[in-house]
Amino acid sequence: MSGSGNVQMIKAGGLSIEVERRGAGRPLLLLASEEQLESGSSFVDELAKKFEVIMPSPPGFGTSERPDWMGNPDDLSYIMLDVIDVLGLKDVTLVGFSLGGWIAAEMAVKNTTKISKLVLVDAYGVKIGGPYDRDIMDIWTDHPSKVVTAKWANPENGKRDFSTMNDDQLTVVARNMESFARFCWSPYMHNPNLRQRLHRVTVPTLFIWGEKDGITAPSYGEAYSKLVPGAKFVKIANAGHYPHLEATDAFMSALNGFIN
Amino acid sequence: MRAWHFTEMPYPNLPPIESLSTMRVSLPNKLFDPKIGADLYNRYLDEYMIADDLGLDMLCNEHHQTATCIDVCAPLTAAILARQTSKGQICILGNPIANRGDPIRIAEEMAMIDCISRGRLEVGFVRGVPYEIFAANSNPTETVERLWEGIDLVTKAWSPVDEPFNFEGKFTHRRAINLWPRPYQTPHPAIWITGSSDLENIKRAAARGFVFATFLQPHTKVKWMFDGYRSAYQDMGLPGGGGTAYMPLVYTADSEEEAEKGARELTWYLNAKTEPQYRNPPGYVPVDFNVNALKGTFTGRTDAMRAKSMEFLKEEGVMVYGTPDSVAKQLKRLYDLVGGFDHLLMMQQAGWLDHARTVKSMSLFAKEVFPQIKDLPRTKPLNTKAAAE
């Protein structure tokens, strides 16, 4: 958590879960990407002017507890639904980025009684092609420099200076990387059962995708969106896997048009 | 002191190393010429048989998707040697039980080889080095858990039962386990574990009476690991009674000049490069190691090794080379520096070291070095309770 909101630990599903809250208004549950870069970005402050932005760290991320039995985003989604119940939220706008988007999709196929809108931004979670197709770039077997060029329209935007971080912050970075691998290693970056369940998502859904995303290409995102009844799909120019960070204005324009 | 011959069975016939970004995982397999491969496999197996004739024991391992090691199945090698030799011990170091995914098959194969060899098998279990994750597609954050679940299941499966038993663990589910055959040795072959830094893991192995082996490490680190082992060792009645094992690169020759040339060939193994993403998959090492990696203070063994000279590596005990008397002296020095050890594992072949030079080195070692070190005493545990019993 690098943001300016109020950070608390709550108990959800029996686990100790970190939650940051910022702003006031209707609840917007923001599920960060695996790198948790969202909290420190200005677009969250902009959202916080109209919504109460609630950012829980799923088990294994941030300082949230990670029990041994936690295996994949399907497991994580139950705890995130528990967070909604524990905080007494209703009429939630659920926005998920990358891994957060996958978790959001897993939540939405289970229970949308307290969720009123769903936004998936460059999300993982399904496999579109056949056994020999690489639907999602393999971020763990490819050379790190190739991953950076695929992830960011402008690789300079992806530079992180670890030398300025203290040990607690570095521990979060290292643990996030480990948890991401633990939950998403195999089947690679998807749940084979998710695509058969997406018909259950009955809330209005928007997919926002960076046009230059080389990890989950726009064609993947578009095919994914067709699995959710009535979902809209919009591309953001000059942006890769994190359009909210690389093309914030265009992203907010697309998002605000849908959530307000 | 027991002395074991070892080669990783490399395929060195590659384009210039400087032109490659990696020799492991993603080096295209179209570079493998099966005719050359056939010659290499048969040659390396011949060398193991020569080792047996010379009175040395035989150590093999397995790796996958790499030019550094085309032995992709240690049980196959061990089975061939079980049938083709009759004197020496055969040790697999080790079965990649965390990556292979089927501990029951491993248990069966080991039992079969133990029978064919009439009780000459020693069985290692390893977590596997980081790059092995990719060929097996095992989850890098789960390898330690898988290793121990697998070891426990294999040792149970080797035991005699009156009826089949079930096992519904985290990584393996079986409903009717009842192994035919059972191992030749009682209660089962000696078990070996490897390691390089996890003292908890080393002590856990020691408490089970396993042999602990480490490779290509500076002697100060080896002593630290062996002291940890000895402080926790419990005799569990396994064949051989546990012990410590160390592997340097070893080359023996008639002259110092020849020895240096041969030893230089062996450094091919230390120089084998691997792309960064294969060297440290997320969660393979604990979070605090990765915090140091982010700070740039943890580079792993091979980067540090690659930068050093042969003289330095000889001083550290990572390389042992020279005339027979010099080699014997170096080994005795190493023995004293690490508080004693029980098994000398020798990488006597690597890279381009050809058959003639390999055999010459092995023969000189067996005839003129081994007699000087074979009576070095078995090392004792440090904990006085075990020593007193």
Image (cartoon, coloured by chain):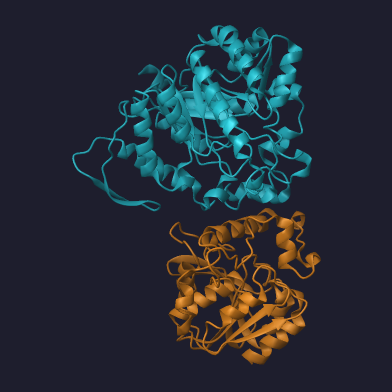
Chain colours: A orange, B cyan
Give the vertical position of B154 relative to A174 (above or below).
Answer: above
Image location of residue B275, percent across then percent down: 69, 47
> Splitting the image into 4 quarters, where does residue A139 fall?
bottom right
Residue at the image point whose x is 52% and y is 77% from the top? A105
Q: Farthest residue in the front direction? A: B35
Residue at the image point whose x is 56% and y is 31% from the top? B41
Give the vertical position of B241 relative to B13 (above or below).
Answer: above
Q: Is residue B70 left or right of residue A76?
A: right
Whether residue A21 appears in this view of the structure is no
Q: In which quadrant of the rendered image does the C terminus of chain B lie?
A: top left
> Splitting the image into 4 quarters, where does residue B324 fall?
top right
**A148 or B44: which is nearer to us?**
B44
Whether residue A221 appears in this view of the structure is yes
**B242 or B291: which is nearer to us?**
B242
Residue at the image point whose x is 77% and y is 62% from the top? A159
Image location of residue B105, percent across then percent down: 37, 42
Give the number of marks.
0
Give the vertical position of B209 relative to A151 (above or below).
Answer: above
Give the vertical position of B100 relative to A170 (above or below).
Answer: above
Image location of residue A138, percent across then percent down: 62, 61
Image location of residue B216, percent across then percent down: 63, 29
**A187 or B210: which is nearer to us?**
A187
